[in-house]
Amino acid sequence: MKIIDDFISFDDFKQLQELMWSTDFPWFYDDCVNVPNDGHFQFTHMLYQYDSPRSNFFNALNPITRQLYLQTDLYSLIKIKSNLVTRTPTIVEHGYHIDLPDLKEYHNTKTAILYMNTNNGYTKFEDGSIVESVENRLVVFDSRIKHSGSTCTDEKTRVVINFNFF
């Protein structure tokens, strides 16, 4: 696992953050977080999938993808999805999962999570380690490692962007 704070420049990050919190950025209701009927919900925005952009906002990620190429062994994107969960009275963990279960046999796939806002939510890994949600922090790990996102209690939302690549 690799954690990189201040992943992109302050100005690029603030510009992306303002876009994602604006009324111009569409969020889509998803009635589950990990598996159907899991009792949780989130809002998502698919940015890239199946070898092509899926959103008009894909190019806004250029500073991130450029840094991924420079600081990781990114060769090709698989999927990019942003997730927004709302504040809950207590922290709720959504359960361990891998983002791309169909690719679990591939040994060179990576997952990266960019935290878009600071809050008391986190990503927890099956080995018990926790990465706190700190804005502009990126965590990169082997895609076969199970992890769980959480809600937060101290901000209105917890927003992340998930990247899957090899």
Image: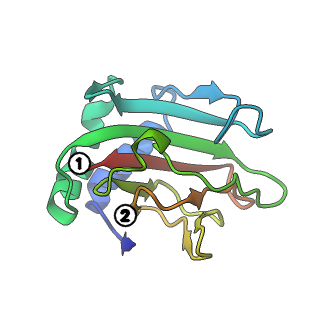
Indicate which disc residue 65 carries: 1
The image shows residue 108, relative to residue 62, as above or below, that is: below
Q: Amino acid at mark 2?
A: Val
Q: Amino acid at mark 1?
A: Thr
Which numbered mark, 1 or 2, is in the foreground of this view? Answer: 2
Q: Residue at point 59% right, 42% down?
A: 84
Q: Is residue 26 left or right of residue 128?
A: left
Give the SS element for disc 2: strand
Give the SS element for disc 1: helix
The image shows residue 70, relative to residue 166, as above or below, that is: below
Structural distance between the alpha carbons of marks 1 and 2 = 13 Å
> x%, y% of residue 115?
47, 57
Q: Determine the image quadrant of residue 67.
A: bottom left
Can the viewer see residue 124? Answer: yes
Q: Residue at point 57% right, 76% down?
A: 129
Q: Which residue is mark 2?
A: 140
Q: Residue at point 32% right, 23% down?
A: 56
Q: Residues within 10 Å of mark 2 (few under 14, many from 20)?
A: some
Of callouts 1 and 2, the N-terminal one: 1
The image shows residue 130, relative to residue 19, as above or below, that is: below
- Residue at the far right: name it: 89
